[in-house]
Structures are given as C-alpha cells and as structure tokens.
Image (spheres, helix red, strand yellow):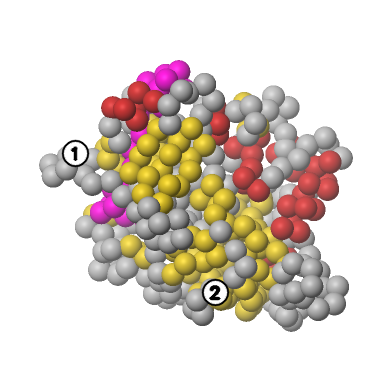
Amino acid sequence: MLSADTTTPGPASNLDIRIANIYIYPIKSCDGIPLSSAPIPHTQKHKRSYGDAFDLENPCLEGLRFDRQWMVIDHNNKPVSQRTTPKLVLAKPQLALNDPNDPRSDGHLLVTAPGMSTTLRLPLCPVVPPGTDPVSVSVWGSSGQGFDCGDEAARWISEFLGKPCRIIFKDPNCARAVVHYLPPPGTCSFQLTTGFAEAYPITFFNQPSIDETNRCLAEHGAKVEHLTFRHSLVFDLAPPGASAGDAKLPPYDEESWRNFELATSSGESIEFYVTARLDRCPMPNVNRETGTMSKDYQPLKAMRTFRTPDPGKPTKVCFGMLAAPIHPPDTVVSVGDRIKVLGRCVHSSVEE
C-alpha cells in the first residue's frame, strides 16, 4: 500500500503545537512506557537485510530508542501478540537507565506482571556471544531475526502466560525495511527500517483527536486512552498561558498534514514527512486493566460508525498517522518540543 498525497492549501500554521506525550513499547504487545524524552538514533550500517533490497551503506532509522526491540515468540518461533494473547498487556516494562538523566545511557529493562513473584531483568544493550545462532521470525509478512534472551526469561514469560514461550531481542545487525506507505522516492536521505513493529517506526496523533473520539464513543458506552493505540508521539497546543488568544487545534487536523518540523530543546530541527493514516487492528479492543479482549468488539465497533475517513480504504477504522523523518536525526526529542506544520495534503491510501 502507499498513500497518494495531493497538495492542498490549508490554514496558516501559526499554532503553538508541542509534543505532549512520548511512548515506547519495548516488548511487542506488552504495555507501554511514558517518557519525558527519547532518542531517535540512526543505527549503524547493517550487515544483513530482510524485505526489499536496499543500500546497507546508508544509515537506517528504527524509530524511538528501545521501541519494540523485544518480542515474545511461541514454540514455533511465531510472534505472540495481544490478538491471540491479550494478557500480554498486563506485563509492565520499565527502563532502569544507568544514568536516569541521560536517555542514551545503558541499563536494564525491568518487567513486572500480576501474579509473578519476581521481576524479569533484561539488559538494554545485550552482548551476543560469538557463534550464537539467530532466530528467524516473520512479523506481519515481513521477515527479520533476533537472539534468544535465555532460559530465565523464557521461564518467566511462560509461567505468566501459561504456555511455552520465549523472548527474543532484535538482531542489531539485521534490518527490516519498511515496505508499505513509503515516502515518495528521494524524500528521505536514508533507509527507513523498523524493529519488531508491524509496519512503521514513528506514529502520532493530536490530543484533540482522541478527545473527539472519546466524545463520540461516549454515546456507545466506550472509551479509549493514549496507550490503546500504541503511538509514539502525541501533540497538543502549548499549556494555557503559553499561547495567545483562544486558538484551537481542530480534531483530526493531523490527517491533512503533509510534512511538519519538530524543533528540539537542544536547538536541532527535524522535518517529518507524513505518509498515511494508520488503520487499526483489533488490539484497541483489549482491556488494559483486565488483559482480556472485549466481547462486544468495542471500541472499534463504534469507531466504525465515524472513523472510516480514508477514501482509499473505506472499510478500515483509522486513527493516527505514520511519519518518516526526512533526514536521519540522531537526536533526542522531549515533551514540550515545538511542532510546526509546513504543508498540507489529501491522504488517500491506494493499492501499489
């Protein structure tokens, strides 16, 4: 799939929009972690690639640091996700950095879960012994590989889920190329790749959009929250008093963005190209408090009545947008960083 974009005029982008929230999901399908800042590094040159061929001599981008770099697999090396095992959302990862003030520092990933008497401890930057064989996996039709996190991690996750499973971490020398919703040729100066995310490394939405979604869902007795949609970034207007007048950010305004600039607190600027709307899988129907899939198919059943805005996929519930940095940033983004909309377009996903 790709997203056709037709340039269209839009209102002047003079609103004081900021990053309001940052989230990562270190273990695919487990709970997310809110952060005040996160690196967006470009990785070392990869030795191996999967998916479409690409130039491994160019730097690659995999999104926010530590995002979906671990994954639970079953005895057949198949990914275990909330679609079939919603209980995964009850596993709560936390970053334990060696230097809490430096988001680039090393440390451990600590994972807790209801009913588990121990905390799982995984190194954030694991060392792979020479000669270790990687595990080949397929994520949503895209091949990749990782390394096993060991028997202790396997015992912990198997006990929690009640079935044989193991945890792997992404092979740092293996690239999974993004093959869907690519920016136009020549837009990005590097290869867009992803960890164990299903399709894209950077996703975002605006706070007024989820507010409006909840307003509509209330009529159906349903609601959603930030972590329901597992996005990377949430944008909103600056806090009251930081902006002049009573300017408002309209709900779903991000669906008309073609590109935007993110100005970091360190003085760097990153331009992002917005490629497509994100159509939703069944995971928003998982109750994050109980770890169960809703039997009434809410909230997606209700959202189908008002959130099918993409003319290229009119039966799909859409919420949020996919974005690709135009140049490898290798920087840190933080809550409060400014967003400036540079251009607008009409997004319509079409078959390749």
Residue furthest to the top: 162
Q: Quadrant of residue 209?
A: bottom right
> How far from the left and from the top, in percent, is residue 204?
60, 58
> How far from the left and from the top, in percent, is residue 11?
76, 78
Q: Residues within 10 Å of mark 2 (few under 14, many from 20)?
A: some
Q: Are marks 2 and 1 in contact (CB under 8 Å)?
A: no
Residue with the mark numbered 1: 133
Residue in the image at 54% along x and 54% along y:
35
Residue in the image at 31% along x and 50% along y:
125
Left or right of residue 92, residue 123 in this image: left
**Which secondary structure lies at badge 2?**
loop
Residue 352, above or below 11: above
Residue 192 appears in the picture as rendered = no
The kind of residue tagged 2 is Ser
The kind of residue tagged 1 is Asp
Left or right of residue 106, residue 203 in this image: right
Residue with the mark numbered 2: 265
Residue furthest to the left: 131
Residue 234, above or below 185: above
**Which secondary structure lies at badge 1?**
loop
Name the front one of labels 2 and 1: 2
Say which of 183 and 6 sits in front. 183
Q: Residues within 10 Å of mark 1 (few under 14, many from 20)?
A: few
Q: Quadrant of residue 304?
A: top right
Label 2 vs 1, first from the N-terminus:
1
> How far from the left and from the top, in percent, is residue 149?
30, 36
> How far from the left and from the top, in percent, is residue 121?
37, 37
Find the magenta span and give its range. 157-179
Say which of 18 and 134 sits in front. 18
Residue 307, above or below 43: above
